[in-house]
Image: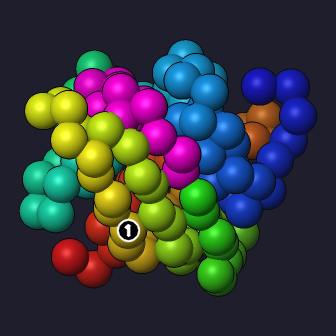
Amino acid sequence: MSKKMTPKEVLNSVVEGINTGNLDSLMMLYETDACFASQPGQLAKSPETIRQSLRSFIDMNGKLDLKVKRVLQTSDVALVISEWSVSGTGPDGKHVNMAAKSADVLRQQADGTWCFVIDNPWGTD
């Protein structure tokens, strides 16, 4: 990733990746050993399971809206709190609306970029 994004900009890149279906660009935003809360209480802990979780958001063919509410940062670690909503189609073909507050932990890499360590779209659930 050539452009050095802030933690807030990384979250905005997630919106772009989901809405355009660019799974490869999304995967570049995660550390190798990152985890993703695919559902409340359920963690995807490998690149392949994170890819599957992101694919399920993309497959809804909906529109993700996200607003970063707060960034708490110290040296190379940031906690990003945001609110998101998505409207699309579920695997059963029925309309789906989801919304939640997310709590994400990002770490600054040696090259200055920021990547997800913990992606928790379900916040405190």
Position of 91 relative to 107 (above/below): above
Extreme residue in the right direction:
3
Image side of residue 59 versus residue 26, left or right: left
Q: Is residue 14 magenta?
A: no
> Is residue 63 visible in the rendered structure shown here?
yes
Which region shows up in magenta?
51-64
Position of 90 relative to 12 (above/below): above
Neighbours of disc 1 within 10 Å: few (<14), some (14-19), many (20+): some
Image quadrant assignment for residue 7? bottom right
Image side of residue 90 versus residue 23, left or right: left
Image quadrant assignment for residue 67? bottom right
Residue at numbered disc 1? 99
In-front residue for pair 84/125 = 84
Quarter of the image with the N terminus is top right
At 44% across and 31% down in the image, what residue appears?
A: 61
Quarter of the image with the C terminus is bottom left
At 16% across and 63% down in the image, what residue appears?
A: 40
> Is residue 46 visible in the rendered structure shown here?
no
Q: Secondary structure at mark 1?
A: strand
Image quadrant assignment for residue 47? top left
Image side of residue 123 versus residue 26, left or right: left
Q: Position of residue 74 (x, y in %)?
A: 67, 76
Q: Position of residue 35 (x, y in %)?
A: 31, 45
